[in-house]
Image: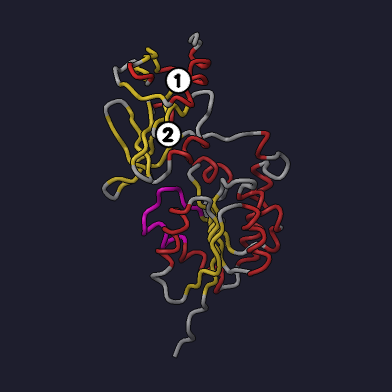
Amino acid sequence: MPPAPKRLRVLIADDELLGRERIAALLAEHPDVDVVAMVDDGAKAVEAIRALHPDVVFLDFQMPGRTGFDVVREIGTDAMPATIFVTAYDEHALGAFDLHALDYLVKPFDDERFEEALRRARRAVELEEVDKLRGQLLAALQGSGASTAPAAEQPQYLERVAVESKGKVRVVPVPQIDYILAAGVYAELHVGDRRYIVRESLQTLEERLDPRVFMRIHRSAIVRIELVEVFLRAEGGDYEVQLKNGVRLRVSRSRREALEARLGVNG
C-alpha cells in the first residue's frame, strides 16, 4: 500500500477578505490540506511564517506595510516555505520570475489554475525540493532589483487588469479604462461601451491606480480625470461631472474641493 500523502500546512496572506476566503474555500476541497492561518498584511505574514512554519504560503504581492518581496527578504530565502505569489500585477510575475521556478496566480484566477499551482507546491514539498525553490527565489529577488530599492520609492501602478468572463480571462489595459463603478463588493470597469466585472473592491483598485490619472470622486466611482469635460452644480447642493462621452457621474461633497482643484475650477 502506498504511503499516505503528506499533509500540507498552508498559510494564506492576502489583504483582501474575499481573496483569503476564496483560497481557503478552494483548499477546503483537499482533505489533506490544513490552513494554519490567514493574515491580512505583510507584518503578520512574517510573524506567522516564523511561528507556524507552514509548508506552503499563498503570498499576496501587494499588501499594506510590506510587499511580498519584503516578506521574503525579512524571512530570508533560506527559511521561506514553498511560495505561490498571488497578484493583480501580472507584470511583476512575468518580469521578475522564471515561470518554471516560482508559481504565481494573477487575480482573478480560475479553479484550474489554482489547482495547478497547488500541485506544483505539493510536488516540491513531497520531493523535498523547497531548497531548490529557495535558490530560485533568491535569484528572482536579485534579478528584479527588489532587494536594493524600497517599494515605497518606486510605486508600481496597475498597467492592466485581468477580467474573468465565461470561463476566459481577458486582459484590459488600464489606459483603456474610462471610469470604474462599485458593483456590490466587486467593481465594474467601463471601457468605451463595454463593462467588465472584476473581483476587486473599488478601494483596492483606487490604491493600485496612478493617482495622477484616476481620482475617486464618490464612494462608488473612480474616473479618469482627463475625460472630465463639464463640472456640474446640480440643485440641492449635489454635484456631477460629465465625461466626454456624455456619461454623468455623481461627485460626493467630501471630494468636491479636491476635484475642483484637480480640474482648476474656482469654487
- The residues tagged by marks 2 and 1 sit, at their Cα atoms, a distance apart of 16 Å
Q: Is residue 18 above or below residue 161?
A: below
Disc number placed over residue 246 in the picture, else none: none
* Residue under numbered circle 1: 225
| Whole-percent x, y for residue 165 in the image | 29, 45
Residue type at mark 1?
A: Ile
Q: Is residue 205 left or right of residue 242?
A: right
What coloring was used for the rendering?
Answer: secondary structure
Q: Residue furthest top?
A: 266
- Residue 182: x and y, percent? 37, 37
Going by the numbered disc 2, the residue's amino acid type is Arg
Looking at the rendered image, the disc whose residue lies closer to the viewer, 2 or 1, is 2
- Residue nearer the viewer, 172 or 180: 180
Range shown magenta? 104-117
Q: Which mark is residue 219?
A: 2
- Of 198 and 183, nearer the camera is 183
Residue at 49 percent across and 11 percent down: it is 267
Q: Is 64 situated left or right of 197 in this image?
A: right
